[in-house]
Image (cartoon, grey):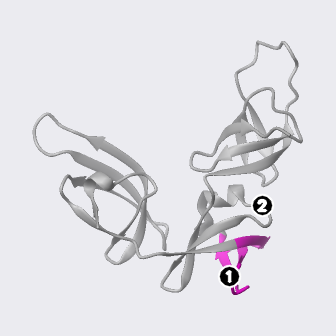
Amino acid sequence: MYTAADLKKGLKIAINDEPYIITHFDFAKPGKGQALYRTKMKNMITGATMDRTYRSGETFEPARLEDRVMQYLYKEDDHYCFMDNDTFEQIHISEEAMGDAKNYLIDNLQVDVLIFREKAIGVDVPNFVNLRVVQTDPWVKGDTSGSDSKPATVETGYVLRVPPFIEEGELITIDTRTGEYSTRVKG
């Protein structure tokens, strides 16, 4: 059982027996009265979003999801294929259900597939993934007129901002929680 104080971005709770993930969280403590917890949530089955405000002391049921460690295999049309490492069972998840996780999928990546009532409804990717930069503008040493970042496309097709010294072919670490550049992989 969660309380309102446990609410945070990424927490999965059950509302009307359906799983929701908190996508935005804000805490407010007015001068008088109880603290307010404003949330924006996404239904993990339908993708519908809603805003809710809770007061301190309210409680929530955790979403009853099963995590299965699976390996990403390939993308076919608008579905992604994963394989259970123990049973070799393959499942397909729609692009819509993948959300932002599709930006970080490379072959053989180990992920947690979320199962709700025997149906795959989403994927949790590791907090950090290493992806190779396939396109970015070259950096001219000594150029101080530009900004402190530039766009780069990684091998999955995802575009993000990177520091100017990152060049094509380099391996970078991306924080999947924010979608931002974290560091350059050396070696």
In the image, residue 11 lies at what x, y percent?
A: 42, 59
Magenta highlight on residue 86:
yes
Q: Secondary structure at mark 1?
A: strand
* Residue type at numbered disc 2: Ile
Q: Mark 1 — residue?
A: 91
Residue 22 found in image quarter: bottom left
Indicate left or right for 19 with 143 as reference: left
Q: Is residue 120 visible?
A: yes
Point out which mark residue 50 bears: none
- Give the labeled residue for mark 2: 106
Which residue is depicted at the point 75% across and 35% down? 151
Seen in the picture, residue 16 relative to 100 is either above or below; the reply is below
CA separation in Å, label 1 and label 2: 17 Å
Q: Which residues are magenta?
A: 71-94
Percent x, y for residue 27?
30, 43
The quadrant where residue 180 appears: top right
Q: Hey, which residue is sitting farthest left in the picture? A: 32
Q: Is residue 141 above or below residue 1?
A: above
